[in-house]
Structure formats: C-alpha cells, structure tokens
Image: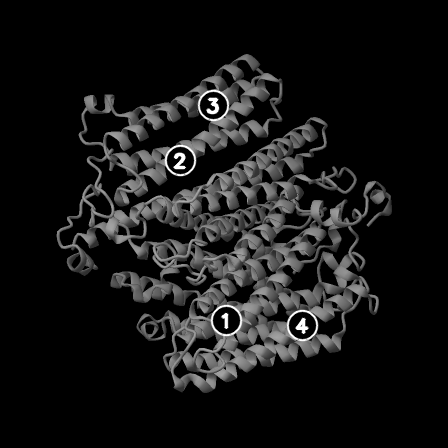
Amino acid sequence: MASAGSHETYYVPEQTKFPFFASIGLILTVYGLGSALNDMKSAESASFSTWISLFGFALLAVILFQWFSAVIRENHAGLNSDQLKRSYVWGMSWFIFSEVMFFAAFFGALFYVRTFVVPWLGGEGDKALTGQMLWPDFTAVWPVVENPNSALFHNPEEALNVHEWTPSFFAGFLPFWNTVILLTSSVTVHFAHTALKAEKRKQLIQWLSVTVALGVIFLFLQGMEYTEAYEHYGLTLNSGIYGSTFFLLTGFHGFHVTLGTFILAVMLLRAIKGHFKPDDHFGFEAASWYWHFVDVVWVGLFIFVYLL
Amino acid sequence: MSAAHDDHHHGPAKGLSRWLFTTNHKDIGTLYLWFSFAMFFLGGTFAMVIRAELFQPGMQLVEPNFFNQMTTMHGLVMVFGAVMPAFVGLANWMIPMMIGAPDMALPRMNNWSFWMLPFAFAMLSSTLFMDAGAPNFGWTFYAPLSTTYAPETVTFFIFAVHVMGASSIMGAINIIATVLNMRAPGMTLMKMPLFVWTWLITAYLLIAVMPVLAGVVTMMLFDVHFGTSFFNAAGGGDPVLFQHVFWFFGHPEVYIMILPAFGVVSTIIPAFSRKRLFGYGSMVYASASIAFLSMIVWAHHMFTVGMPIAGELFFMYATMLISVPTGVKVFNWAATMFKGSLSFETPMLFAIAFVVLFTIGGFTGLMLAITPADFQYHDTYFVVAHFHYVLVPGAVFSIMAAVYYWLPKWTGYMYDERLAKLHFWLSFIGVNVLFFPQHFLGLAGMPRRIPDYALQFADFNWISSIGGFLFGASQLIMLVVVIKCIKGGKKATAQVWDGAKGLEWTVESPAPYHTFTTPPNPDLIETP
C-alpha cells in the first residue's frame, strides 16, 4: 500500500464540456425519436422529429468520440496512475453486469411465458381458467404458432427453432453457423490478446481483423435470417409472443454485436496506429470482455430460443 | 491538509461554467441536492393538488383524468427526482471525504450522470402541457393501462425512464468504483462508515435492477409502437408478466431508497448519543441481508393478481423474513441511544423520528405481507399510508437529518437551530396528521387513486388534507434555513458536533474545494 510519501496523484480533470453537451445530444435523440414514433402512429409526417433525433445522435456521437480521444491522450501523456486504471476496470466490470441484467429481463420474460403463461392460456395448470374462459380453442405449444386471437396477432407460418436433430438439418441451419462463428471469434480475440501481450503487433492486427470480420459475417447472417423470417416464415414482431420474444432477444443481442464489432474495429484502428502496450491496454481488454459477454449471451439464446 | 500540495489546484471556476462543466464531487453533490430539492417542491405541488381535491367528497378542482396525471407524476417525480438524487448527492459530497479519497473515481462520468437528469425530467414534465396530457397510469404504470389504453405521451415517459436509468447506473458504477478503489490506506472495508457501506450495497442493487426497468419499459415501447404482445394475452403474452418484471425492479427500488437512509441514521444517532454505534458488524451484515432478500420478494405487491398458491406462500414468508435484519437495525439504534449522553439538535430529532415512524411503516408492511390479509388491504389507502410512512418520515426525514448534520461542513456556517427545530416539529406533526388517518381510511375500504369517495370517508380525508397542507407549507422553512445558512451565520468549527466521528470532520468547515489530494494520516481512521 502506498505510503503518503510515494503517493501518486489521482488525475481529476478540472472541468469538462463533454458530459453536458452529451446530455443535450442524448435528450434530443430520444425526444426526436419519441416524437417520430408518435407522429407515425397518428399518421403524421415524422420527418422533422426524425431530423431532431438524428441531429441529437450526431452530436452525441461526435462528443463521445472526442471524450474517448481525450481519455486516450491523457493516458499516453502519462496522467493515469495505476489506481485510476483500476477505476476503469471496475467501471467496465459493473457495466457488463448491468448488461447481463438487461438481458435477464428478456430471458426472464421468455421463461415466464413458456413456463406459466402459455400453459395457463392453453387451459392447463394453476390458472387454467384463464384459457378455458377466454380462448378454449387455444392449445399450449411452444413455439406458439397459433395465437389465442389470430385476428389481432397474425400467426407465423413456421417457427425458426430446431425442427429435427439431424446433421443434415444443422448443416443448413443459420443459427448453428452463427454459433460457430461467434464461438470462433471469441477464440480469435483471445489470440489477438495473447499476441498483444507477446508484443507481436502483426499477429495482433491479423487476429483482430479476423474477429471483426467474423462479427460482420454474423450480422450479415442474422440479417438474412430476419429477411427469411419476414418474407418466408411470416414471423414478425406482430405475430404474437413467439415473434415478440424471438425478435427482442435476438434483436438486442444483434444490436450488442453491432456495438461490439464497432468497438473492436476501433481497437483494430488503434492497434494499426501503434496504440497499446503489453502492460497497458485496458481499452482493448475491455472490448474483448464485452465481446466475450456478447458471445455468452448468444449461447444462452441458441439454447433457449432455438434448441429447447 | 498540507498547503504545499495544494498549489497546483485551482478553486472553483467562475460563473455558470462551474456548474455546467464541473468534475468536482462537491459541486456535483450540490447540484444533485438542489435538483432534488426542486423536484421535492414540484412533486409536493402535485401532492397538494391531490390533497386539495380529496379535501371533501365530490369533484371540486380537477378532472378525474388530470387527477390521475397528478398521482402518476407525484410518484415518479418523488421517487426518481427527489429521493434518489438526494441520496446520490449526499453520496457525492460525503463518500470521498469519508474514505479519504481525492474525488469520485470517474469524475467526468459523474458530471454526466447528473446532467442527464434535468433534461430527462424536463421531457417528462413537458408532457403536462401536451394535448394528450401527462402519463395517467400511476407510477407503477401497469399494462395494459400503460400500453393499450395509454395517452401517446407514454412514449416520452418511456424514454425519460431510459435516461434516468442510464443516469442511475452510471452514478452507481461510480460509487462502487470509488468505494472499492479509492479508499485511503488504512481504511479497510470494516472500518468504513456505515453510510459508505449502505451506499455500496445500494449501488449494487441499482446496477442489478435498473437495467430490468429499462427492459420492461422497452417491452412497453414495442407493445405500443411495434405490435408485439408481451403484455397482451390475445397474442400469448400476459399483463401479469408486466407486474413481475416491474416489481423485480420495483421492490429492490424500495430498498434503494431506504438503505442509504439507514446509513445516515446510523451515522447521526451515535454522534448525538456520544457513543459508538452498537453492533457495527451486525449493521453491515443486516444491510447485505436486506439487499439480498429484497430481490426475492417482489410478488408480494401482486398477491391479488392470481398466482399459484405456492408463489403466494413463498413471497409471504420471504417478505416476513426481511423484518429480521430490519429488526436488528432498529434494535441497534435503540441500543446505541441506551445510556448515551443524548442531545437533541435538529439532525438527531429527525433521526429519532425516523426510527419511530419508519418502524410504524415497517409494522404495517408486516401486516401487508400476510397474504390473506393483503387481499383485504390491497390497493386501499392502507397501502398508501404504509409506503408513505417508510418514504416520508423514513427516507425523506433521513435526508433532512443528513442535510442539517452536514450543512455546517458544506457552508462553513451553523444553520439557524430555532428555525430548523420549528421545521422539524411542524413536519413531524404534519406528517402524522397527514398519513396516520389514511390507515383508518384504508382499513375501512377507501381505494387509492380515486378523485372522489363515499361520504363515510369524509372526516379522515379532511384531517389528512389539513396535515398535508401543514407538512407542505413547513418545507418552505427548510428552504429558508438552507439559504440563510449559505449566506452566513455563526462560523462552524471543523468538528461542528462534539460527538461526530469520521474523516469529514478532520477537514476545516467549509470543506476545501479539494480534500485528501494526499491520503489522510492512517491514525485518524478509527474503528467505528
């Protein structure tokens, strides 16, 4: 433990303009988005609101870019003590925990629906009366392809989960390949990390490029799956609880993959510019933690949305 | 603090930019506290509208729909705008000083978590002036009231909640990083003041449940705008699912608002009893147990929605279990005062009132935990009385105690003790006249969230309203005391209260702009 004599100064910037203007950017983004959604719902032109939202988002993006640049510059200038770096480590760890809890809400909804709601609506279990009184014809199966009221929520033609447990089925099953891709990318980002610690810049760049490419391929395949779902399976946001849970779980995961890929791409650019030292590269490490987290969520998704 | 180290530090910047761009934990704490105070008066104004309408039976002042907007906005503003930011403000001001840290761990993010809030509340409040009116579905925004039947302003409500949630998560991450990483040498975990401990646990709860709140409002957003059916049984969803996800957030939220209050009271009672806190270790473990239990009791808010009997029983017993660690705390506070050399300055008065009145709220909570009894009490004024007892003379009194306790340290002047005591006694009388009759109203069957009621409820309602006006008006005294204290008064010493313990009393009053840029002498750190 540091004695008072050897104490390093904890860098506290005197002032900062980033957060105040980032708040303005953020609130314009959501206010514009909210107005646009309401405009569309009441069949009015949403273009003005959309512009507000886009302007807000651009402001937010520019400021965050400058904010991160400033943090990197300060680190290069040697302002960051070891203690300050530990603050970033704690910060990132607890941020990932908050993300875990965000997904927990959607997984919780999925489990609750599958364990309780659908059987009850189907006239089974403790609250069987709900289904018997409201929709006696509804049968409880998961995935729900026949909704209790299919006039309000149109039925999907087919579900997107595993239909048969044969090698030939899996060979043509996009989510299976997406699992392979994401798991591989977790390994490649680890190789990149090892290369960084061994001061092998070229390998770092190569493995990181492979990881980013795998992220992009994943997103492309996910896009293909969504197109298929909408055009060929009739599975949409509007097709009842199966579509709701399917699209929000995979959609938020896809959004996180997009963000993760973007972050890794930034790390790649920084690696090319010569950033990161074997003993000082938390930006990279945080990005890889995030990537592993996104990977773990996908494994959960693959098991509970596609397999079981 | 050694003056030699301070030469490269500047004082605060001049003018508005000090407040907009500051990274200083004391400035940000001040911003949080003033924001909370403003929201307290805004939410209080809504409450006055409610009590005025309920002064006598029949419709007098407002339309029923506007009445619903008032109850909704009152709850949202008080919970997310007044109580939570007040505790974050106290945390900002006090935690770095209590653990001997130079500032919060992530000072720029600290500024961001504050400045999101005024914008989020501006957006939420602006819905009052929109054609569709403000949200009117209660602060618990149950589906389908908040989805199928919601005014279109629900969209702004959803995004406001997202922004407030982001602010809370960032604030909580900052507090955890500060407590775990910034403690001065010698400040071991079991030497931390209890306010720091309870905030560490609160921050954990915030990070665990605010994302779940974000999740549930996101599901609402998609149900409202994109045709999903999370909360619509016609599509295979369930409105009760909303309540489960909401209360998974909502119950820990209750403890988010009371755990820091426990920390404040555990600081103030020993100071004015001139004794060490009784059972420090048990206080820490009790706080952690409460936090854990708070996450497995959420469905006690939903006994009447139709749950399997096993669920009803589990949530009933788990809820009753919380009274064990809470009882430990109340016992410890009483034991701390026992044979102490007590004096009754304003912070102590508020702290003692907290112990007594919070315990009343705790006992009614125990009544509500009994499932079959709750079938009778559910959604009556008994529930309103219960949670207002734990929130107003509970959380809010502890905030006032904290403000009076640390105000001399913040401003450098003693506050006007006579006025402050007047504020206490009027608040104490007002709050009991306001909320105690509501127990009787609820037991007699008056439902909550109604603008009009049957004649037999008239007497207790006007008594309650009189108490409400008294309580509301007496808060203006506090505003006067605070402003007077900022402007001047008797100079405060560094120690301020002769029985006060902790590192914050080792620095002069007002606390210098930067404290502990070099860590304090480890000998100053006492075992609590």
Residue at 35 percent across and 55 percent down: it is B242
Mark 2 surroundings within 10 Å by alpha-carbon count, few (fewer than 14), some (14 through 19), many (20 or more): some
In this view of the protein, can residue B331 be seen by the observer?
Answer: no
Badge 2: chain ID: A
Seen in the picture, residue B15 relative to A170 is either above or below; the reply is below
Disc 1 to disc 4, how far (Cα)?
20 Å
Residue A97 lies, in percent from the top left, at: 48, 42
Please determine if labels 1 and 4 lie on a single subunit. yes
Q: Is residue A21 left or right of residue A103?
A: right
Q: Amino acid at mark 2?
A: His
Q: Earlier in the sequence, mark 2 or mark 3?
A: 3
Q: Which residue is mark 2?
A: A253
Amino acid type at circle 3 is Val
Q: CA distance from mark 3 to mark 1?
A: 52 Å
Q: Is residue B399 left or right of residue B159?
A: right
Q: Secondary structure at mark 2?
A: helix
Of A295 and A236, nearer the camera is A236
Name the residue that disc number 3 marks: A189
Quadrant in the picture for the N terminus of chain A: top right
Q: SS of the residue at dot 1? A: helix
Q: Which residue is mark 1?
A: B388
* Quadrant of residue B244 within the rendered picture: bottom left
Residue B238, can we see it? yes
| Label 4 sits on residue | B476
Quadrant for the C terminus of chain A, please. top left
Q: Amino acid at mark 1?
A: His
Task: Answer yes or no: are tags 2 and 3 on the same subunit.
Answer: yes
Q: Is label 4 or label 2 in front?
A: 4
